[in-house]
Image (tube, rainbow, N blue to C red):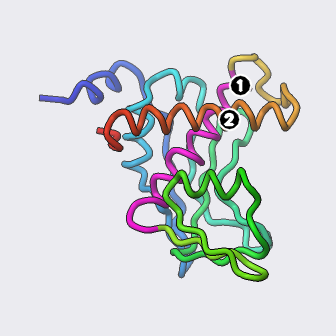
Amino acid sequence: MESPEAEAVDSWSLPPIVETPPRPGYHHPATRVEIAEVLAFFGEEVVYGLRSIELRQADPRSSGLQLGRLVIPGQIVLYEQRPSPWTLPGHLEGDEAQRLEIAGAQLEPLEAATIIEWPGDTLKDFMLIEVLMHEVGHHLLQHHKGKRLERIARTRDHELFADAMARRCREVYLDHGGSFR
């Protein structure tokens, strides 16, 4: 017998989830199956209008941390990550540090850097909720305003909406016992 989630997904479809293998020394913290489970868990309204989700290699020329992004219209990209621990230059400010700690990261501030340790499945959960669902928030804002090719809100407002989406998803996830099944 199929689960209620599987039966619900039969009546609507998930967007394609395309994976490019990570470079040596990197990995995709969440698998295509885990991404599909999260999307099925949150339901049809979060995938409406999504064209694809891609697991990609990060741009090696970029000096910053690349997690994910929305490519308008309707494509979400999640980037490969280095294994834990991460060493980031400088100190993380309040909201950034708090978001990582809420997601389960352990932060160790040093004189000129911050060490971020991701124990257990915390990096996977972070990528699924804080990154994927944040980008879904950006997509929903764009899609429901009918503006498929142009940004419809100031960056600050876009980020506030996407952050609120990720926060609501984390609350639902925790209310469900920390499982997407």
**Residue 141: image tag:** 1
Q: Residue at left 70%, top 80%? A: 110
**Disc on res. 23:** none
Q: Quadrant of the C terminus?
A: top left
Vertical relation: 180 (above or below) 104: above
In the displayed structure, would residue 116 be above or below residue 4? below
- Mark 1: which amino acid? Leu
Answer with left or right where residue 177 lies relative to residue 97.
left
- Magenta span includes 154: no
- Check if residue 127 falls in the magenta segment: yes
Pick the front one: 54 or 126: 126
Q: In the image, what residue occupies the spot 50% across and 34% down?
A: 169
**Where's residue 2, x and y in %?**
17, 29
Amino acid under disc 2: Ala
Query: Which residue matches tag 2?
Result: 162
Residue 51 in view, yes or no:
no
Q: Where does residue 56 sit, x and y in percent of width and height?
A: 60, 60
Residue stretch in magenta: 119-143
Secondary element under disc 1, as helix, strand or loop, is: helix
Regarding residue 168, the answer to whether it shows in the image is yes
Q: Residue sitting at 72 percent across and 33 percent down?
A: 73
Q: CA distance from mark 2 to mark 1?
A: 8 Å
Give the mark, 2 or 1, whose residue is nearer the N terminus: 1
